[in-house]
Amino acid sequence: MPRPIEALVHPAALAHNLARARGAAPDARLWAVVKANAYGHGIERAFEGLRGADGFALLDLAEAERVRALGWRGPVLLLEGVFEPRDLELCSRLNLWHVVHCNEQIDWLAAHKTQQPQRVFLKMNSGMNRLGFRAAALRAAWARLNALAQVDEISLMTHFSDADGERGVAHQVAAFEAATRDLPGERSLSNSAAILRHGLRSDWVRAGILSYGSAPDFPQHDIRHWGLRPAMTLRSRLIATQQLQSGDTVGYGSRFVASGPQRIGIVACGYADGYPRHAGTDTPVLVDGVRTGTVGRVSMDMLAVDLTPVPQAGIGSEVTLWGHGPHGSLLAIDDVAQAAGTIGYELMCAVAPRVPMRVAADVEP
Ligand SMILES: *Cc1c(COP(=O)(O)O)cnc(C)c1O
C-alpha cells in the first residue's frame, strides 16, 4: 500500500471562487492566474474548475503550452513577458499575449519577424519597483510599440504592492491614471486583494490566490468572510498512536513535554511532503473532522497530533492537514500558514511531488 497521504483538487470550489471574483468585478474580464503550476494545484487538474475565466495568465512558456494543449483557444497572457528574443516565436505560434515591461523587450519585438502582429500589455511601474516603466518613460515606450508592425493592440497594466494592507492602492491608482490618462487601450490593474477589497473598475482583473480558496488579506479577513472555499485538500491518516505520561517528550529535540497523561497520533505527513517544518506545537489540524493541534517538531515523514479531543481516533483515522475534512469539516490553509509564519500561497505551491494529487470526484467539495 502507498503511504496514505494525498492531495485533492476541488473543481467545484475553483468555479465557486471564480464566480466570487466575477461578482466583485462584474464589468471586468477575468484572468485566471495559473502561474506556478496553478499555485501548486496543477494546470491540468485546475483547468476544469477555472475554464469559466476569460483567459489564463502565467509566467512560464512551458505552462502556456500546456494551457494550449488542453484545447484552450482564448487569451493567454505571459505576466512577465518574454525572457529572450526567440520566445516571441512561441508567442506567434501559440497566439500568446505578453507583458512588455522593459526596453529590451521592445528591441526584441522590433527585430522579430512575424506575419501576425502581437497583442501586448505595457506595464507601468506605479510603485512596486519590480517590473515596468516609470511614469516618465511610459509614453515613449508606448510610442515605440505603437510604431511597430509587430504589435497589434497595446493594453496597459500595473501591479499593486499593498492591495491587501493598510497602505492600499490609491497612490498607485493615481500614479497610473496620471501617466496613462490620454493613452488608448484596455486596462488591467487588480489582483485578488484589489478585486475583493477595492472594487476598482478596469477591463481585465487578475484573480490568483482567491480562486484557490485562500484569503489574500488574512488574518484581517478569512475565507469565510470572503465566501471562498478551499480548492485543495491535503490529507493523510494516523499510522500509530502513543500514550504519553507526564514528562514524556515527543519528536526531535524533545520540543514537546507532556504535562500529564495524553494520547497522541502519528500522521504520515512531514516536511518532505511540503508540510511546513516551521509549524510549531498547536498548529491546527483535523482528525476525523475534529479540530486539534500538532505536537512537537514536524519531521521529514511524520508529525504528531494531540488526540485529546478525538478519543475514538486510532490507526487509519483520517487527518486533514488543510482543506475539506469528513462530515463537512473545513480547515483553511491560511490557519496553518499563519501558525508556520507564512502565507497560504507558499503552502499550496510547495506540496511535494511525492504526494499523489488528483481531482476530487465529489461534485461539491
Ligand atoms: C501573481 C500575480 C497576480 C495574482 O496575484 P494574487 O494575489 O494571487 O491574486 C496578479 N498579477 C500579477 C502581475 C501577478 O504576478
Image (spheres, rainbow, N blue to C red):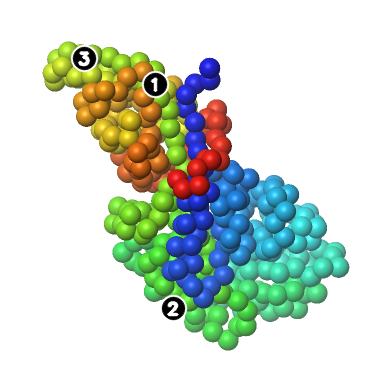
Q: Where in the figure is residue 310, as x and y percent of width and height?
A: 25, 27
Q: CA distance from mark 3 to mark 1?
A: 20 Å
Answer whether residue 363 is visible to the viewer in this image. yes
* Left or right for 51, reference 19: right
Disc 1 element = loop
Disc 3 element = strand
Mark nearest the camera among 2 and 3 is: 3
> Badge 1: few (under 14), some or many (20 or more) residues near its Cα, within 10 Å?
some
Q: CA distance from mark 2 to mark 3?
A: 60 Å
Residue behind mark 1: 316
How many numbered marks are there? 3
Residue behind mark 2: 174
The disc placed on residue 5 is: none
Q: Where in the figure is residue 363, as x and y percent of width and height?
A: 50, 47
Is the residue indicated by label 3 positioned so its CB lies within 8 Å of ligand 1? no
The answer to whether the residue labelled 2 contacts the one labelled 1, judged by CB atoms less than 8 Å apart, is no
Residue behind mark 3: 244
Mark 2 or mark 1: which comes first in sequence? 2
Residue 32, located in which quarter of the rendered image? bottom right
* Left or right for 138, reference 276: right
Mark 2 or mark 3: which comes first in sequence? 2
Q: Where in the figure is residue 41, as x and y percent of width and height?
A: 54, 43
For the residue pair 294 and 3, the one nearer the viewer reads as: 3
Figure check: 110 above or below 222: below
For the residue pair 135 and 358, the one nearer the viewer reads as: 358
Location of the C terminus (image quadrant): top left
Which residue is at 71% across, 69% downward? Answer: 119
Figure check: 239 above or below 198: above
Q: Where in the figure is residue 190, as x and y percent of width and height?
A: 48, 67
